[in-house]
Image (cartoon, rainbow, N blue to C red):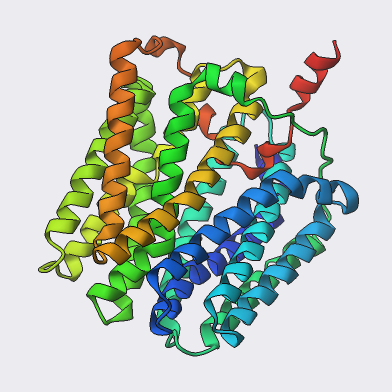
Amino acid sequence: MKANLKSVTALLISVAILLTGQGLQGTLLPIRASLEAFSTISVGFIGAAYFLGFTVGCIFGAELVKRVGHIRVFLAMTALASTTALIHSLILYPWIWVLLRMLTGFCFAILYVVIESWINDRSSNQNRGVIFSIYVMITLTVQAFGQLMVLLYEPNGIELFAITSILITLAAIPIALSTTPAPEIKQTTNFNFTKLFKISPAAIIGCLFVGSVNGSFWSLAPIFMTSLFSDISYTVWFMTSTIIGGALSQWPIGFLSDKIGRRKMIVINAFLGVIVASIIISSIQSINFIGINLLGAAWGAVSFPMYTLTVAHANDHADPGDYVLVSSGLLLMFGIGAIIGPLLSSILISLTNASGLFIFTGIMHLLLALYLSYRIIRRDSSPIDDHISFNDALAATYTASQVYEYEEDDIDSQSE
């Protein structure tokens, strides 16, 4: 175990630096867009563009890695992502930002491919869940820290964009100087949505809805907060609170899903999401700093673990050889939802007010809860004993690398 962790130490350091910059940029851009009086629909397009670029990067990035290798691709993508961060501060035009965010999403998708395929290559079936849990915790922690960095300077200047660029650039150094050999890409995965639908139609619909909710939140929550409070620190702390809430609830919810079933846990979380969204909407005129942060933490606690639960549910019904098919297909469904969600929620905000964001997320959570409740009533869940453990499910969840990568065992079984 120590040897496995040592082999990815440089990589995890790069991840920490890189995602700190991503966390800073993710909140900075909507705040700056609000200060520049971009329309809400424009901000929605900017948010959707990131996930469009991310989805394209997941599909086509592997070919780029095949041609020139993990390390060169990582260095190139950090350079490009660093450059786009600075250009945002120089060209304050919405449709240019749409293109820049699409490019940023493409870069980060490929960076995730490099990072996660490297981790997969250096871990075994016995310790992959533990190593990925460390990776996930680092991801959530540094993204929360990145949110707080927005408070270092006024968002209407160039300083925060420069810090974002610096962090993304510095992330390349540990990888560039690492002596650990890079992994090889084994083979390209052929998508089979018909098979995926047969494995778990609930997971396909679930990921589409969860993607629309999470994509909308990341794209428009800063707009929601700046419309309520002129103090930028309120926005920063709200975003940080949601991440902390999601981090703290990940394992308790996973543990409960092992006991009572994935679909039931998703339904419970979805109904809780409706309740939290309703409370936010009803208290929007009188909420204070402590109240909005507690609600933000509650929203993150019920919403952020739902993707992991959904993929884990699909893996419960899949053969081990289909885990990569499941994860890659559901990641793409999540991406499609995250593209559509910001567009629809931004239109709803324009037609109503800032609370339209949580009207949208509340509706999505409600529809998901009703659909899965119908599925549970119509068809009994698999016995709890058939569930893989949530710790094992984590190793096959939320990884861009699995859009294209087969496990060694899968390749061997196909050649027999």
Residue 225 in the image: state x and y as whole percent: 29, 70
Where residue 374 sits in the image (x, y, percent)? 29, 20
Relative to residue 148, is residue 402 drawn left or right?
A: right
Q: In the picture, which quadrant includes the C terminus?
A: top right
Relative to 388, residue 3 above or below = below
Q: Nearer the viewer, residue 139 or 69?
A: 69
Identify the residue shown where x is 28% and y is 23%: 373
In-image side of 388 versus 113 (left or right): left
Counting from the top left corner in percent of width and height, residue 402 is at 67, 37
Image spot of residue 148 (x, y percent): 41, 72
- Comparing 241 with 132, the one in front is 241
- Quadrant holding the N terminus: top right
| Residue 223 visible to an observer of this rendering | yes
Q: Residue 9: tell me if it is visible.
A: no
Q: Is residue 368 left or right of residue 180?
A: left
Residue found 82% across the figure and 51% down from its top: 64
